[in-house]
Amino acid sequence: MSKQQLMNGITELNPSADPTWLEHFDEPALRLYLDHLQLTIEPRGTSWERTSETTAVVCRRSAA
């Protein structure tokens, strides 16, 4: 898909996404976001595959 096609798909699923803002992102980032939006319209319980960009477990240490 071209960048414009990705942006069109995103604004179709998320009308509040500003095309001017979306222009700042490259095609891989737009594809990832569009994939995420498409997953959110699937019924609960649909399988989801975690990408390597996200960790399975996140923890934080207290500042004190």
Image (cartoon, rainbow, N blue to C red):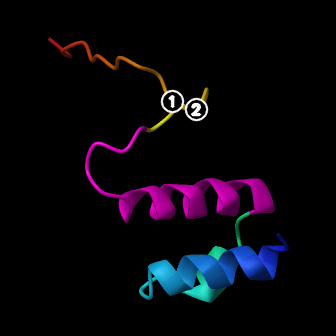
In this view, which residue lies farthest toward the right?
Answer: 2
Q: Main secondary structure of the magenta part?
A: helix
Rendered-image quadrant of the N terminus: bottom right
User: Does 3 sit left or right of 46 as displayed?
Assistant: right
List the residue tagged with mark 2.
51
| Quarter of the figure with residue 35 | bottom right
User: Is residue 14 placed above or below 35 in the rendered structure?
Assistant: below
In x, y percent, where is residue 38?
A: 49, 63
Q: Is residue 37 magenta?
A: yes
Q: Amino acid at mark 1?
A: Thr
Q: Which mark is residue 14?
A: none
User: Does 43 sit left or right of 53 as displayed?
Assistant: left
Q: Nearer the viewer, residue 62 or 35?
A: 35
Please tell me how crowded label 1 is: few (under 14), some (14-19), or many (20+) other residues with Cα within 10 Å: few
Q: Nearer the viewer, residue 30 or 63?
A: 30
Question: Contact (CB < 8 A) between labels 2 and 1?
Answer: yes
Local secondary structure at mark 1: loop
List the residue tagged with mark 1.
54
Which residues, given as a range, are shown in magenta? 26-47
